[in-house]
Image (spheres, rainbow, N blue to C red):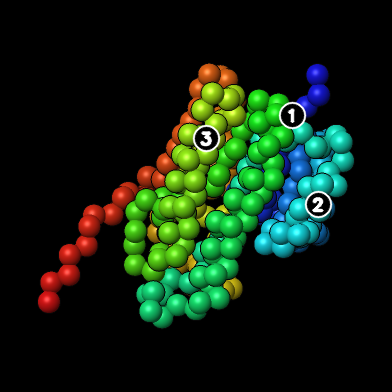
Amino acid sequence: MSSPTAFITGASSGIGRACAAKLAENRYQLVLLARREEKLAELAAELSKTPVHIIAQDINDRPALDSAIAALPAQFSNIDVLLNNAGLALGLEPADQTDWDDWQTMIETNCTSLAFLTRKLLPAMRARNSGHIINMGSTAGTYAYPGVNVYGASKAFVEHFSLALRSDLLGTNIHVCNLEPGLIAGTEFSNTRFHGDDEKAALVYQNCEPLLPEDIAEAVHWVVSQPARMNINRMEIMPVCQAPAGLAVHKA
């Protein structure tokens, strides 16, 4: 019996890297997509006992992504698990002070490219009547906070897109899950959000114990390991130091 294949985007660091290691440990072969080829090669070397196919490119370059999918080696062409992990937040300014390019990049990466890759791989899953799509959402898609604006909206899209996919796939054996982490360290998320300001990024996690990428990797493996009759629609995960905030009231 051949090993199942998992396609992971944003695989070179953080959650994607941890998920690759966890699934490799559980005998998955891997298609790993990220921009930094050297990071992907390093990960593939660490997972030397696991068959790995690397796609080193920007997920927002959709013609190149289309070509890469068409050129998948036969061994990796049947995708059993699609982990749409690539995503980012840029900035934490109020909406009227944000950079439009940051907004556009978040929409392109978190929404458009996620939908594009799903659309490219879904027909083959449908033809085989099997597969698992896990979309990396965020608690920011449910709970608004100052400065979350387009990032939160993009993750709300991911949540609704996931539920809509499952509705379209009713009657099939294809599973869809929206995984929604809260505060998480050990990734490049905050460094990216603050455009490389390491000091500002570190303050996000000061005096608390956030989630780690390995926690999310455990959740991903749990989701794909459940009985075929069971679909995990949504999974919201927060560290103990975090809770949904109350509604804000401004009093003059």
Q: Residue furthest left?
A: 252
Relative side of 3 to 104, left or right: right
Cα distance, mark 1 to mark 3?
24 Å
The amino acid type of the residue labelled 3 equals Asp
* Mark 1 closeness class: few <14, some 14–19, many ≥20 residues within 10 Å: some
**Residue closer to the observer: 52 or 71:** 71
Look at 76% across and 53% down and name the residue there: 66
Relative side of 247 to 200, left or right: left
Residue 135 image position (x, y, % from top left)? 55, 44
Which structural element holds mark 3? helix
Which structural element holds mark 2? helix
Q: Earlier in the sequence, mark 1 or mark 3?
A: 1
The amino acid type of the residue labelled 2 equals Ala
Disc 1 marks which residue?
4
Q: Nearer the viewer, mark 1 or mark 3?
A: 3
Can residue 191 be seen here? no
Query: Residue 189, located in which quarter of the rendered image?
Result: bottom right
Relative side of 56 to 23, left or right: right
**Residue closer to the observer: 46 or 101:** 101
In this rendering, the answer to whether 161 lies above or below 175 is: below
Q: Earlier in the sequence, mark 1 or mark 2?
A: 1
**Residue closer to the observer: 242 or 222:** 222
Residue 193 image position (x, y, % from top left)? 52, 68
Q: Nearer the viewer, mark 1 or mark 2?
A: 2
* Mark 2 closeness class: few <14, some 14–19, many ≥20 residues within 10 Å: some
Disc 2 marks which residue?
68
Residue 186 image position (x, y, % from top left)? 57, 54
Disc 3 marks which residue?
168
Look at 81% across and 51% down and name the residue there: 68
Residue 80: which numbered mark, if any?
Answer: none
The amino acid type of the residue labelled 1 equals Pro
Q: Quadrant of the C terminus?
A: bottom left
